[in-house]
């Protein structure tokens, strides 16, 4: 009996080690997090602000006056452009651009939702706020839009750092979300997941483009998972939360949990809640 119990314990130990090993690929030995986290400050009832905070929870700074309902702020590090979508009380969508210091801000579109920026900052991604929910790129200089998706109901999108791929989550036939890659180099569309009854949504690339972080409810709660794009392997670091954003060195992740901004190492350790808020975006 002792021999059998020892064998069972050894098998369980090996299994646990095999589950942990892939997570180390996305989160190497992490140094202290650097940069700042941009997020939607919800600390005042009935008002939202675009704000930044240091990863240790100090240095909070508001960048905008109050808006009715700011969602999903984004930044382009190369150009300094920042942007967000505001939902008005009558549920209209407005897209705003602002300078990095927040001193210049302007509304540029209505009826669409901002999804992100091209790496060079010349284009932004937006999705239409209608039943079609198609994805477009928009040239900031010429103010010309180009449709990217065809009959895909896009719920979120992110542009890879090498400019070659756009990761999207798409509302599919059974009412859940799956993940796709759309090539910007005429290489077509790649479906990454096909999981009936399971949501995989809001993908975001790591800075090196090798991984996607995204939200999954395959285990009941909303959790953050990773997808190794080369090996096509999923990694589950046991981080309960939504709307992940990866640090530039990919060793840390910020996310939304219970209407607060949380942070932890990429493997799910050293969790800390920073401030009331939503939809973080890590910036340098």
Image (cartoon, rainbow, N blue to C red):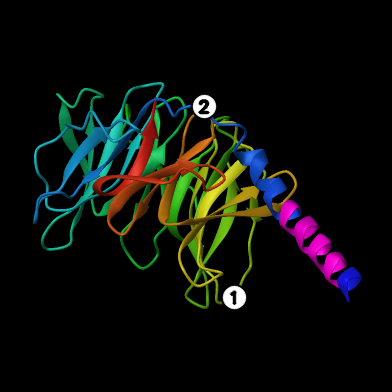
Residue 158: mark: none
Relative depth, front residue between 72 and 171: 72
Looking at the image, is mark 2 or mark 1 earlier in the sequence?
A: 2
Which SS class for mark 2?
A: loop
Which SS class for mark 1?
A: loop
Residue 135 percent location from the top left of the image: 43, 51
Residue with the mark numbered 2: 31
Q: Quadrant of residue 161?
A: top right
Looking at the image, residue 110 sits to the left or right of residue 190; the answer is left
How many marks the image carries: the answer is 2
**The magenta segment:** 5-17
Looking at the image, residue 164 sits to the left or right of residue 46; the answer is right
* Residue beneath the point at 46% across and 27% down: 32
* Residue beneath the point at 23% across and 28% down: 59
Q: CA gap, disc 2 to disc 1?
A: 39 Å
Q: Is residue 79 visible?
A: yes
Of circles 2 and 1, which is in front? 2
Label 1 Cα crowd, 10 Å radius (few <14 / some 14-19 / many 20+)? few
Label 2 Cα crowd, 10 Å radius (few <14 / some 14-19 / many 20+)? few
Residue with the mark numbered 1: 196
Looking at the image, residue 215 sits to the left or right of residue 138; the answer is right
Q: Quadrant of residue 275?
A: top left
* Residue beneath the point at 54% across and 35% down: 251
Relative depth, front residue between 124 and 7: 7
Residue 156 percent location from the top left of the image: 43, 53
Quadrant that contains the C terminus: top left
Above or below for 101 versus 42:
above
């Amino acid at each position: 009996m002792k021999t059998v119990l020892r064998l069972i314990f050894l098998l369980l130990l090996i299994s646990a080690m095999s589950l942990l090993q892939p997570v180390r690929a996305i989160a190497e030995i992490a140094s202290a997090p650097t940069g700042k986290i941009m997020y939607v400050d919800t600390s005042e009832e009935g008002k939202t602000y675009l704000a930044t905070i240091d990863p240790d929870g100090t240095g909070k700074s508001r960048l905008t006056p109050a808006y009715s309902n700011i969602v999903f702020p984004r930044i382009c590090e190369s150009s300094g452009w920042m942007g967000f979508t505001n939902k008005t009380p009558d549920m209209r969508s407005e897209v705003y651009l602002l300078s990095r210091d927040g001193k210049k801000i302007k509304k540029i579109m209505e009826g669409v939702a901002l999804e992100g920026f091209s790496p060079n900052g010349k284009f932004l991604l937006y999705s239409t706020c209608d039943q079609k929910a198609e994805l477009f790129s928009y040239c900031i200089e010429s103010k010309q839009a180009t449709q990217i998706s065809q009959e895909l109901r896009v719920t979120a999108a992110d542009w890879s750092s090498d400019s070659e791929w756009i990761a999207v989550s798409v509302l599919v036939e059974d009412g859940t979300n799956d993940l796709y890659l759309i090539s910007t180099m005429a290489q077509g569309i790649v479906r990454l997941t096909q999981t009936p009854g399971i949501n995989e949504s809001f993908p975001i690339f790591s800075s090196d483009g090798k991984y996607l972080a995204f939200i999954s409810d395959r285990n009941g709660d909303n959790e953050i998972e990773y997808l190794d794009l080369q090996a096509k392997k999923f990694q589950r670091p046991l981080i309960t939360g939504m709307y992940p954003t990866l640090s530039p060195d990919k060793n840390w992740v910020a996310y939304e949990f219970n209407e607060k901004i949380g942070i932890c190492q990429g493997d799910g350790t050293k969790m800390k809640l920073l401030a009331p808020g939503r939809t973080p975006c890590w910036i340098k």
